Image: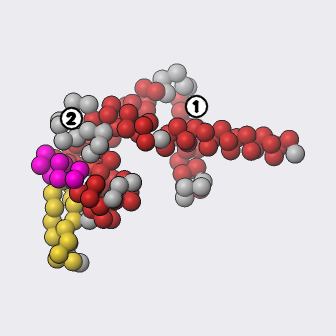
């Protein structure tokens, strides 16, 4: 019974930590830090669209919407800002000529690369008080949790 209670406590502790990570305000604050000084079109509001598009590859606003937790019109508004900045472009959807796909431009790909470097640097700095072994174990276990855990 004691092991079960300890197991439940671990589950609660992880759930609480995930709750903090998944809060919109937590993500928005991080996205604001990452995009600071990157130009007017790229901010905490447009970052999720650009980042999701980098993960998914070319797709429609409707397909991208569930990835970023917005509706199609919200994605379209943000995509319009990113397009004006030269970070994405629209191209006809070969499967449906009435629709268009959102695609990263070369400049968009470079910006995503810089954002990923900024994020990695931010993470590394936040782990500065950890030993290399602790950080490596955390990365390994987090990867395993995302592959095998409740979000898989």
Residue that mark 2 sits on:
38
- Depth check: give the residue in front, 132 or 98: 98
Q: Is residue 24 left or right of residue 46?
A: right
Q: In this view, does 32 lie to the left or right of 6?
A: left
Local packing at callout 2 (Cα closer than 10 Å; few below 14, some 14-19, many 20+) is few
Task: Identify whether 141 is placed above or below 57.
Answer: above
Q: Does the magenta stretch include residue 109?
A: no
**Distance CA(mark 1)–CA(mark 2):** 32 Å
Q: Tell me which residue sits at (18%, 41%) in the image.
A: 41
Task: Identify whether 54 is placed above or below 125.
Answer: below
Q: Main secondary structure of the magenta part?
A: helix
Picture coordinates of residue 36, whole percent (x, y): 26, 31
Q: In which quarter of the image is residue 133?
A: top right
Residue that mark 1 sits on:
134
Rendered-image quadrant of the N terminus: top right
Q: Give the range drawn in magenta.
A: 77-85
Picture coordinates of residue 13, whole percent (x, y): 66, 38
Residue 54 appears in the figure: no
Q: Tell me which residue sits at (17%, 77%) in the image.
A: 97
Picture coordinates of residue 102, whole percent (x, y): 22, 60
Query: Considering the numbered disc 2 on the image, is that residue within a helix, a strand or a loop?
Result: loop
Picture coordinates of residue 14, whole percent (x, y): 62, 41
């Amino acid at each position: 019974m004691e092991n079960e209670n300890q197991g439940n406590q671990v589950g609660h502790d992880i759930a609480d930590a995930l709750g903090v990570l998944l809060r919109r305000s937590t993500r928005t604050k991080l996205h604001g830090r990452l995009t600071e000084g990157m130009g007017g079109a790229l901010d905490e509001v447009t970052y999720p669209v650009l980042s999701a598009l980098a993960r998914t590859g070319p797709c429609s606003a409707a397909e991208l919407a569930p990835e970023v937790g917005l509706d199609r019109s919200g994605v379209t508004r943000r995509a319009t800002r990113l397009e004006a900045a030269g970070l994405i472009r629209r191209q006809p959807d070969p499967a449906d000529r009435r629709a268009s796909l959102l695609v990263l431009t070369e400049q968009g790909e470079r910006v995503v690369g810089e954002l990923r470097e900024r994020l990695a640097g931010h993470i590394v700095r936040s782990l500065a008080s950890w030993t290399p072994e602790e950080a490596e174990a955390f990365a390994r276990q987090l990867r395993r949790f995302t592959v095998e855990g409740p979000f898989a």
